[in-house]
Image: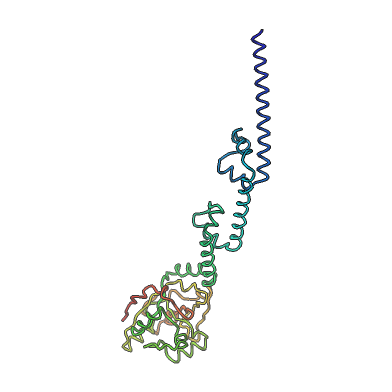
Amino acid sequence: MFFLVILAIVCIALYVIDKASKSNKKRLINKAEVIKKTYPRAFKEYESKHRINLSSAKKTTLKEIVKRPRNTWNNEEEALININQKYDEIKRQYPNGLDKLLSRNQLGMPPEELIQKENAIIRLEDEYNKEKDTYKKDHKEITKFLRDNYTVRFYHFTALDNVKSIWEMGGLYSWYTLKQKGIIIPVPGGTELSRTLDTRFGLQDYVRLSFCEDHPMAYRLIKQGKDVVLFEISIEVASLNNTLFSNMNATDSNHQHGGKLADLEKVDFLATHKSYVSRESPYFKTHQAEVLVKSFIPAKYICNFESPEVIS
């Protein structure tokens, strides 16, 4: 009987202690909840850093949270607010630069690290804007269309005597720009008639490129006893904003030219891929389809700038 009384007392005591403990834990959770609502960013950071869940946290953990100085919570909250405000500002000012950075396998990068990379984001934004200003809107479609039609280079022929000045100028200029600059080239391309026709069609300030390596006009130069070289040009120039496409030699009165994909689609690639087309061939004119690049082609687009091929 005595033993049962003792057991009952112990059970009651344990119940009271457990209830008090649960009540105490509940009070701690309530206090922690107040802190969480007051300092949501700082609390979320704390939870993440310490890998805790408020509803299942131990009493010792809850006590640490509750006893943590309020000014610490406040300072951390303000710091995180500033970080998020700065991040939002970067996101608003440099959306494309931010997207470019995040696309480079950095999707999980937190705002504070992104802020540290602000200069990189600005640089990427500048690159995006430059690309937007430099390239056609449909430049990807144009590049794909060229590759689908087995075109990976364009070509520009000139007399060997001109190579030294081309190297010195750092690329290929239109005859009109050379004239404006007062630069005299040893062996000018084209004739007075072709230049008159260029001007008539508003194409005097364009560098002419061919789709074929064996342009008939190059062989006319060779027959005149000139050594001729062939520069290979990256198809990237087709994507430049002011680049035009002509379905035949752009001095021909029947030619059609324009800067859109639809204009490039008028080029007869069956004709451009043929070799040594005679004047009598129905492909003779379309074999001479052209890409016209505005004013200047820098050396970076010229694949064999240092060593152009000599053709004969």
x then y, percent, for residue 79 = 60, 52
Residue 96: quarter of image: bottom right
Decide which of 202, 222 is in the foreground and name it: 202
Residue 294 appears left or right of 307: right
Q: Residue at (59%, 46%) from the top-left corner?
A: 45
The colour style of the image is: rainbow
Q: Does 218 appear above or below 56?
A: below
In the picture as drawn, the residue positioned furthest to the bottom comes out as: 192
Q: Confirm whether residue 277 shows in the render.
A: no
Residue 181 appears left or right of 224: right
- Looking at the rendered structure, the number of numbered marks drawn on it comes to 0
Residue 287: quarter of image: bottom left
Decide which of 60, 97 is in the foreground and name it: 60
x then y, percent, for residue 269 = 44, 74
In the picture as drawn, the residue positioned furthest to the top comes out as: 1
x then y, percent, for residue 54 = 62, 38
Q: Confirm whether residue 135 shows in the render.
A: yes
Residue 44: quarter of image: top right
Decide which of 198, 297 is in the foreground and name it: 297
**The N terminus lies in quadrant:** top right
Q: Does 78 appear above or below 300?
A: above
x then y, percent, for residue 99 = 55, 59
Q: Does 297 appear above or below 200?
A: above
Q: Does 118 appear above or below 262?
A: above
**The C terminus lies in quadrant:** bottom left
